[in-house]
Image (cartoon, rainbow, N blue to C red):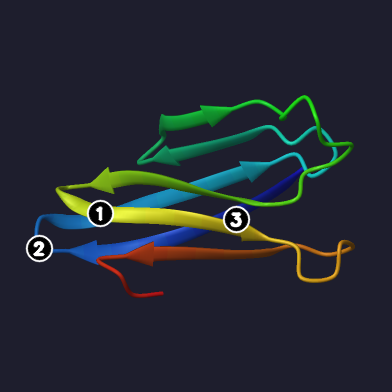
Amino acid sequence: MTTRTWKLELEDGAHTVQLDHGYFSGKRTISVDGRPVVQTAKASHAAFDVGSQQAFTVAGHPCEVRIETPNGLTYRYDLIVDGRS
């Protein structure tokens, strides 16, 4: 399991976004300020997680966590807020 944490400064204050990603199980949980906002399970057709995009909002701002595997062996994680990485 991999955990990534991002700290955001928005107009209403500081926020923390955390991703917990099980790269073999494909399970992922995205939490904002300690509260889960997205929870997914592995897709039944995949032997391992091949990546995804999960959308949610933080204080009215559109956000997205992208999980990519450019080579099938490693993962790259990115948080997009208001269309910016």
**Quadrant position of the N terminus in the picture:** top right
Tell me the CA gap for discs 1 and 3.
19 Å
Q: Mark number for residue 4?
A: 3
Q: What is the count of numbered marks?
A: 3
Compared across the picture, whether 73 is left or right of 49 comes to right
State whether residue 65 is above or below residue 11.
above
Observer-nearest of 25 and 45: 45
Q: Which of marks 1 and 3 is in front?
A: 1
The residue that label 1 is drawn on is 62
Q: Earlier in the sequence, mark 1 or mark 3?
A: 3
Amino acid at pointer 2: Glu
Q: Nearer the viewer, residue 43 or 20?
A: 43
Query: Which mark is first along the chain, 3 or 2?
Result: 3
Q: Could you say whether the residue bearing mark 2 is in a helix, strand or loop?
A: loop
Secondary structure under tag 3 reads strand
Residue denoted by label 2: 11
Neighbour class for label 3 at 10 Å: few (<14), some, many (≥20)?
few
Amino acid of disc 1? Pro
Could you tell whether 76 is left or right of 46 in the image? left
N-terminal label among 1 and 2: 2
Residue 64 picture location, percent across and down: 40, 54
